[in-house]
Amino acid sequence: MNNYFYVLLAFSMLVFSNCKQVEKKQTPPNILLIVSEDNGPDLGCYGVKEVTTPALDKLATEGTLFEKAFVTYSVCSPSRGTIFTGLYPHQNGQIGLATHKYRMYESFKTLPVYLKEAGYDTGCIGKIHVNPESAIPFDFRAIKGSNFAKKNLPKYAENAGKFINGTDKPFFLMVNFPDAHYPVQKQVEGMPKNPMDGTDIDGPLPFVGADSERLRAFTANYYNCMNRLDESVAMLLETLEKTGKTDNTIIIYLGDHGAQFSRGKCSNYEAALQVPMIIKNPLIDVKGQRTDALVSSVDLVPTILEYANIETPKNLPGISMASLVSGEKETNNRDYIFAGGVGSAVQFYYPRRSVRGKRFKLIHNILYEETNPKVAIYDAHANAHFAGGTERSEAVAAGEIVSNAYKTWENPPKYELYDLENDPLEFVNLSEDKTYATELSHLVNVLEEWQTTTNDPFADPKKLELFNQEIKDIKEKYPTLKYNRDKNFKWKYPEYFME
């Protein structure tokens, strides 16, 4: 009898223990998505010695660092549209800045909707910056503006604490930090603690090519922004730790696109599209891993959905990165990364597409017979956002190779081709070199196939003609290009692009 009792007791404990394990396994993890503005992989963990980023460096040692991560468009709203929908900008319609009234074609099912349906509480701190914002229905919102002044940065962590402590459900929280968006301030409210100036660095960002005291000053302040970003992230992660939920919270960090220097933001060069990306999954033992797999921001939604145990819709073009983070797979079997670009505003209109392989990169300049307006805007420092742009005299002073690169950027051929292995800064266009004719032709075919597969309206001559005409009509109706201040203004492209 006693033996029977002990056997029954042991069996009951085993069943209870297994139930607890199943329960723990089935509990969805929390997900913290951190997005910074206007910065490339300029962190200590990416080998940049000019910055001091201990919080993000530590995050990399605790997770997986992606050495070749890219976004789909080098401007805020289109890039964020991809983060929210898992679609390329021309697929969701957010092909320009929300402040210039570009908008998604329809109310796509977006990240917070997927997660709320799965029982998550969702929150967003910082800007959303896509149209319509009603398509991104977070349960919790705080600090809704852009905050380019970088004021009250500790409030980001404080609000995060309020949200995390205020829910008993699994949570998804997106925190959008304003650094390193222009203006690039040296120090704000004592952050960063130890700012640097132009005399503390060896030169401007390498892709800029040119060098001057003025450019060094802007570059130093960009690095100060990165240091300030890290201090903000440190406060956020400390707050998460205090909630006691760190051990069940997956952390994803990335930049929304590259830095706003000439040949960076608003272009399709590597400096515009390559971003830092780090994923920490505390539920696995893999730590301090680095991968050179090609990944894109279209992969974020599939990754987050997999972590949340949500089936990924078949129409999404991305590939979950979860197996790369776990070490289950060394590669995602992706050979190419694609990106778009329209110009973000009417005055910046200059559409292009690009494809990047493991060695070669192709840029298709759709209106190649016209001059790229962004070069003159950077040169003239048209507003505070372009203050750190390279002046023509600085480009010329840098020598023939750099000067020619700027000329190519301003008046490009139909196709630009770069050998990233031997020319990672994309200074020498090889598209007219017959030695690379086969590679050029191959990448053109790859790009065109992607445009067909993703229903790119800019690959349709009739739709392109309609959009060109719409741009022309807006310029004629609004000579000072203040169309975005007209309450009645509305883009027509979402209708005819979807036909």
Image: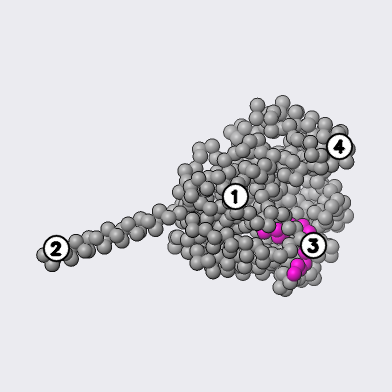
- Residue 218's mark? 3
Q: Measured from the top left, where is residue 454 in percent x and y?
A: 60, 35
Q: Which residue is mark 1?
A: 138
Which quadrant holds residue 45? bottom right
Question: Mark 2: which amino acid?
Answer: Tyr
Question: Mark 4: which amino acid?
Answer: Tyr
Q: Secondary structure at mark 3?
A: helix
Q: Earlier in the sequence, mark 4 or mark 1?
A: 1
What's the residue at 75%, 58% (across, down)?
148
The answer to whether any part of residue 276 appears in the image is no
Whether residue 182 is in magenta: the answer is yes
Whether residue 450 is in magenta: the answer is no
Find out whether the residues at labels 4 and 1 contact each other: C-beta distance under 8 Å: no
Mark 2 to mark 1: distance in Å? 55 Å
Q: Please state which of the two labelled residues, at mark 3 or mark 4, is closer to the viewer.
A: 4
Q: Measured from the top left, where is residue 466 in percent x and y?
A: 75, 28
What's the residue at 57%, 40% (across, down)?
109
The local crowd at label 2, few if under 14, some if 14 to 19, many if 20 or more residues have their Cα within 10 Å, is few
